[in-house]
Image (cartoon, rainbow, N blue to C red):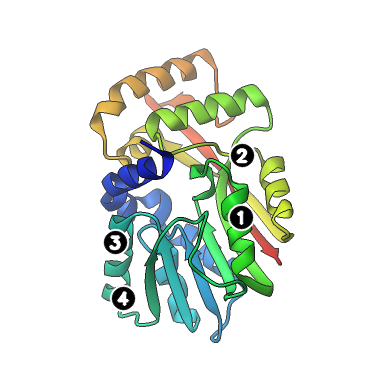
Amino acid sequence: MDHLQRVQQEFTRQASQFATAPAVTRGELVQRFVDAVPAGADSVVLDVACGPGIITAALAPRVREVVAFDLTPEMLSQARQRCTSAGLTNVTFREGSATAMPFADASFDVVVTRLSLHHFQHPAEPLAEMSRVLKPDGALVLADVSSSEVAAESELHNAIEILRDPSHVRMLPESELLDAIGAAGLVVQQHTQWHEAREFEEWVRIVNDPDRVSPLRTVVRTLARLGQHAGTGWSMADGKIVFFHRWHLIVARK
């Protein structure tokens, strides 16, 4: 199985859980992203790796058109259902890979992507594509989770994420994330970061694969008790395994 097939397999299974998970649908989190998007009534926006259309549906009432683009048909189905239920008529849906997008150069005023970059084997490729399809002075709005700048912590963090979801490749340290955006010919104009508290059971439920839960629970509980926090604060609180994700929200201009 190649990596794109693995991504499709994982997100086909995850689609319904992901579409309703509070960790990605919570109103405050969505609004924080939408408020950062420099788009107006005449803007044409591309939502890369749109998933179940959470950001697509939130942006559509504010702009002329949103193109929802994703690799996984089931995710696009979830996005289409969300937009139809909301009565949105200015959204189109396209299937494909973000490493070779079927759009002309300089097609979009804004490109957005959320929680996608860590699923790419070579993040430079989708970033280059997102830059290519942006109009001059267009904006990329990107949100993703980073790993620690300490190499051993970053490696442990990403190993745990891969055990949960094999389509995960690597959450980049902040410095690498910013360097990758710059290498795509984009200039960072805004950058905010924060910690999102997570709880193990909620986190593993999203992947919708009960066979993974018990062994992974044993691993992370042991790490937490040994003080191996992986740069994400793995610990025990009132008998629960807890940690945090370090989010970054970045606005960059072409």
Q: Which amino acid, mark 1?
A: Leu
Q: Residue 227 falls in which quadrant of the image?
A: top right
Circles 1 and 4: CB atoms closer than 8 Å: no
Label 4: few (<14), some (14–19) or many (≥20) C-alpha neighbours in 10 Å: few
Left or right, 146 with reference to 114: right
Mark earlier in primary sequence (1, 4): 4
Mark earlier in primary sequence (1, 3): 3
At mark 4, the secondary structure is: loop
| Residue 178 coordinates in the image, percent (x, y) | 70, 48
Q: Which amino acid, mark 4?
A: Ala
At mark 1, the secondary structure is: helix
Q: Closer to the camera: disc 2 or disc 4?
A: 2
Q: Closer to the camera: disc 1 or disc 2?
A: 1
- Residue under pointer 3: 78
Q: Residue 83 falls in which quadrant of the image?
A: bottom left
Q: Residue at x 36, y 23 (%)?
A: 216
Mark earlier in primary sequence (1, 2): 1
| Residue 31 coordinates in the image, percent (x, y) | 50, 65
- Residue under pointer 4: 86
Q: Residue 253 falls in which quadrant of the image?
A: bottom right
- Residue under pointer 1: 127
Mark earlier in primary sequence (2, 4): 4
Q: Residue at x 59, y 68 (%)?
A: 133
The label on residue 172 is 2
